[in-house]
Amino acid sequence: MDKYNSRSTIKNTSFMSTFLIKNGNGKNRLSLRAKRFVVIIAVHLLFFLSFAIDIQILEGTLSGSRFLGFHLIDLFSIIQVYLATYHLSINMIIGAVTILSVYLLVGGRTYCAWICPYGLLSEIAEKMNNTLVAKGVIKNREFNHKVRYVFWAIFMILAFSSGYLVFETFNVVGILSRFIAYGWSIALVWVVAILAVETFYSRRAWCRYICPIGTTYGILGPISATRVEWNDNCDHCMVCHDVCFENQVLDLTKAKHAKSNKENGISHQYVTGADCTLCGRCIDVCHQDALSINFRLKELI
Ligand code: SF4
Ligand code: SF4
């Protein structure tokens, strides 16, 4: 993919070409999307091999696992378990504190972009949705992204009132993770149905409006140490807006802020919105190199 995109050319970029970035001197390098896909595939290969040939490196699924013997548990899962049973084992608490510490360092919804297997499939569905919208076959349907907090509360109330992890019945991430580790199940039909909704009805609808796992990790985002950083090389071309499925977090790139930033001497700012997944798509396409992923631990302290 040529880094020197405009809003009109980015629409015609093929999905495969987004794995390589051609920079100013014509050299290709791997895009952040390519690096993410390698990480996602490697993590799930470890889940698969740990069960299939008993190598015992990463056992279990994304909801709860053991990495080299250390317990790990997804943060939304542990909240659900507590609400449903009023009990947590010591291993669960250790697993949750480990995951909490990791995501406070690496950026909250990094889970969605760098670990979640559904996120990978959803990006392919997103490209198809964008193409269908560009050709006028379907409409671009957007909703209030804050509806995710309503779904989050509903799934919590369901766990509390029923004593069961009701969300796990609908959880496309858990269904896919169990499929990768343990094999085929009829529940995959639900994953296909959700992907169809994202392709033909609304871009990234599950990730954007429904998934309470992403919402939980998002709560850590604003206080996490790793964030996307914007600088004033930005020419407000809005290409990053077009590629970002949570582009409400990129408000700082809009031209309307340029004057006040200049007056107040603001030359760089962090993207602190909870919904940023640190996917790096905005960085991959920014022709001004105005965005980067940076570690801001010193500034937080
Ligand atoms: S950050 Fe980069 S891609 Fe986004 S508006 Fe600024 S120049 Fe354009
Ligand atoms: S702001 Fe950039 S890194 Fe964050 S979700 Fe949007 S495209 Fe991805």
Image (cartoon, rainbow, N blue to C red):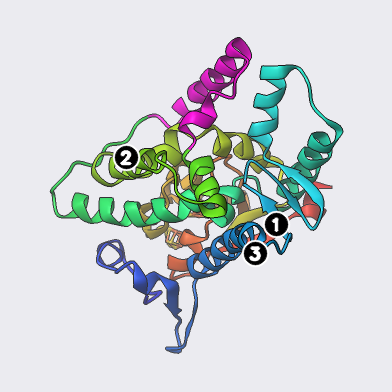
- Please tell me whether residue 151 belongs to the stretch shown in magenta: yes
Residue matched to label 2:
193
Residue matched to label 3:
53
**Disc 2, SS:** helix
Q: Residue at x 59, y 10 (%)?
A: 161
Name which of mark 3 and mark 2 comes first in the sequence. Answer: 3
Compared with 14, 105 (above or below) is above
User: Quick check: can you spot residue 262?
Assistant: no
In-image side of 93 versus 216 (left or right)? right
As drawn, the label of residue 58 is: 1
Compared with 211, 245 (above or below) is below
Displayed-image quarter of ligand 1: bottom left
Residues rendered magenta in the picture: 144-171
Relative depth, front residue between 298 and 215 = 215
C-alpha gap between disc 2 and disc 1: 29 Å
Query: In which quadrant of the rendered view does residue 124 lie?
Result: bottom left
Relative depth, front residue between 86 and 150 = 86
Amino acid type for the residue under numbered disc 1: Leu
User: Quick check: can you spot residue 93?
Assistant: yes
